[in-house]
Amino acid sequence: MTLVQRYIGFVDALNYRIGRIVMYGIFVMMGILLWSSISKTFFLPSLWTLEVAQFAMVAYYMLGGPYSIQMGSNVRMDLLYGECSDHRKAQIDAITILFLIVYLIFLLWGGWESFQYSISYGGERSSSVWRPYLWPIKAIMLVGIFLMLLQAISEFFKDILRIQGHDMGAKV
């Protein structure tokens, strides 16, 4: 049991710290888009701004996903779930999180294949005018998917411990 609890503690702490840092990425995106608006209005339009904003959004979304799962701020259908007891919620979550884990494994596999493709051809580039390399954002996506997989496994372990009667805090 201690190994599982240490895993939960490590993964939760890691994703909490990363999530708290990444949440300020919204200001990075705002700055990029503000510069885009200013440069289009007063100067020559910058070719890089919209694509960098898209990359920042991908990083924000992918690296913030595990934090979102940990905080329980993901979207769920509460029509029947909201009326269940904490024990029943843990049972439902333990089953449904397995589907998420399988999905994330396939997503990680596909992301790895895409990342390898980007690297193998001397660096796949975007088809835009700016033509940035795509491997850095694909690497960030791989890290985000991997962290989300670790967090999903942590949530599964927490649900199993809740089913067994351990106090893991209230399910949000």
Image (cartoon, rainbow, N blue to C red):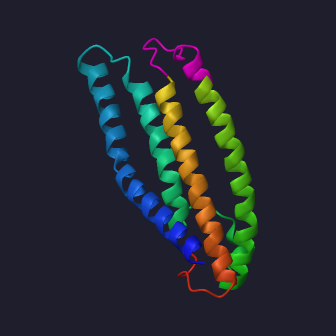
What secondary structure prevails in the magenta region? loop
* In the rendered image, the vertical position of residue 68 relative to residue 144, given as above or below: below
Please say whether residue 85 is visible from this viewpoint.
no
**Direction from residue 68 to residue 160 in the image, left or right:** right
> In the rendering, at what x and y percent does residue 10 appear?
47, 65
Residue 84 or residue 162, whichever sits in front:
162
Residue 91 or residue 74, whichever sits in front:
91
Residue 48 or residue 67, whichever sits in front:
67
**Direction from residue 72 to residue 44 in the image, left or right:** left
Quadrant in the picture for residue 161 = bottom right
* In the rendered image, the vertical position of residue 167 relative to residue 151, given as above or below: below
Q: Is residue 118 magenta?
A: yes
Figure disc tally: 0
**Direction from residue 126 to residue 163 in the image, left or right:** right
Give the residue displayed 74% in from the left and 64% down from the top: 96
Could you tell me which quadrant the C terminus lies in?
bottom right
Quadrant in the picture for residue 40 = top left
> In the rendering, at what x and y percent does residue 32 appear?
33, 32
* In the rendered image, the vertical position of residue 88 relative to residue 156, given as above or below: below
Give the residue displayed 58% in from the left and 46% down from the top: 145
Q: Is residue 16 magenta?
A: no
Give the residue displayed 33% in from the left and 26% down from the top: 36
> In the rendering, at what x and y percent does residue 79 appear?
72, 72
* In the rendered image, the vertical position of residue 156 relative to residue 170, given as above or below: above
Please say whether residue 39 is visible from this viewpoint.
yes
Could you tell me which quadrant the N terminus lies in?
bottom right
> In the rendering, at what x and y percent does residue 151 appear?
56, 60
Give the residue displayed 61% in from the left and 67% down from the top: 155
The residue stretch that appears in magenta = 117-133
